[in-house]
Amino acid sequence: MNAFKIHSKDETTDQPGKCYGCRDSTQAPIDIAFAFQPIVDVNSRSIFACEALVRGPRGESAYSVLSQIDAANRYQFDQRCRQVAIASAAALGMDSFLSINFMPNAVYKPEVCIRSTLDAARAHGFPIERIVFETVEGEDVRDRAHLVDIFRAYKEFGFKTAIDDFGAGYSGLSLLVDFQPDLVKLDMALLRGIDTDTVRQKIVRGVIAICNDLGIRIIAEGIETKGERDFFVAHGVGLMQGYWFAKPDFNAIPSIDDSAYQG
């Protein structure tokens, strides 16, 4: 069962339409900030999106933050991440897409839980059509149908959707049967050394063909070498992310050296 119950208008007179997560967030919020790692478009040699990666307020590791999350504060943390990521992106003048990771198990009713995100976007003047919500394929989701409902609701609100680490879990292809996101980020384990590994090449070519047929754009995540980059360029994948282009930059948008595109 969900940790928080959604209340209808009849059940809650003081704050109708809200769940316990909205009403009962009495714990002090965890201090967070963000590092941003670009997703580049190698064809236009530009930043397509920046992924918001949670950090501590002084740049502490993601682990130091995520280790504080449990069932009691998951909802509050997920909501705060969205709000701070949007505020930070707006403060930096980000004009690319902003990619935000979300926790499906922290969303109890998409049309209700999204309200604070919409409020943050309006308050900071960040267009919702430039927000991408992504979640990991292998995320411990209690109810797959619930995840699909979240994705569909987000798409109706105008957000872009993405599945991260595609190929790392067991449900990737079957998930695509139920919902076709705008973007799929290939798991970096699939592409490591792909320029010299014929097995990986055959598997990834199959995924590329499927996504092309479904109208889904692929992001090659974790690019670290020229050979890995060149394999995907040769196979028509223009969106990439990884240390070859830029490492995450704390409270800043990294710059991309032109040699990363052509070196």
Image (cartoon, grey):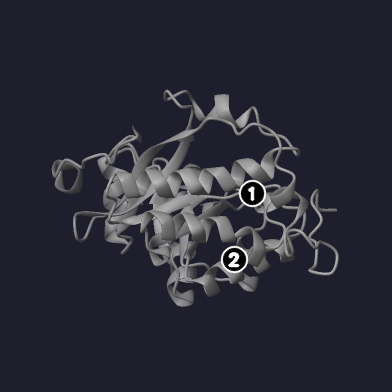
**Picture residue at 16% right of the left edge, 40% below the top:** 257
Residue 199 seen in render: no
- Residue beneath disc 1: 138
Q: Nearer the viewer, residue 75 or 67?
A: 75
Please identify the quadrant where the C terminus is shown. top left
Label 2 packing within 10 angstroms: few (<14), some (14-19), many (20+)? many
Separation of residues labelled 1 and 2 (CA atoms): 15 Å
User: What's the amino acid at mark 1?
Assistant: Gly
Instruction: Say if 106 sits above or below 131 in the image.
Output: above
Q: Residue 148 placed where, x, y %? A: 66, 66
**Secondary structure state at the residue bearing disc 1:** loop
Instruction: Say if 9 sits above or below 43 in the image.
Output: below
Instruction: Say if 68 sits above or below 232 in the image.
Output: above
Q: Nearer the viewer, residue 147 or 189?
A: 147
Identify the disc placed on residue 151.
Answer: 2
**Secondary structure state at the residue bearing disc 2:** helix
Drawn side of residue 104 relative to residue 81, left or right: right
Identify the disc placed on residue 42.
Answer: none
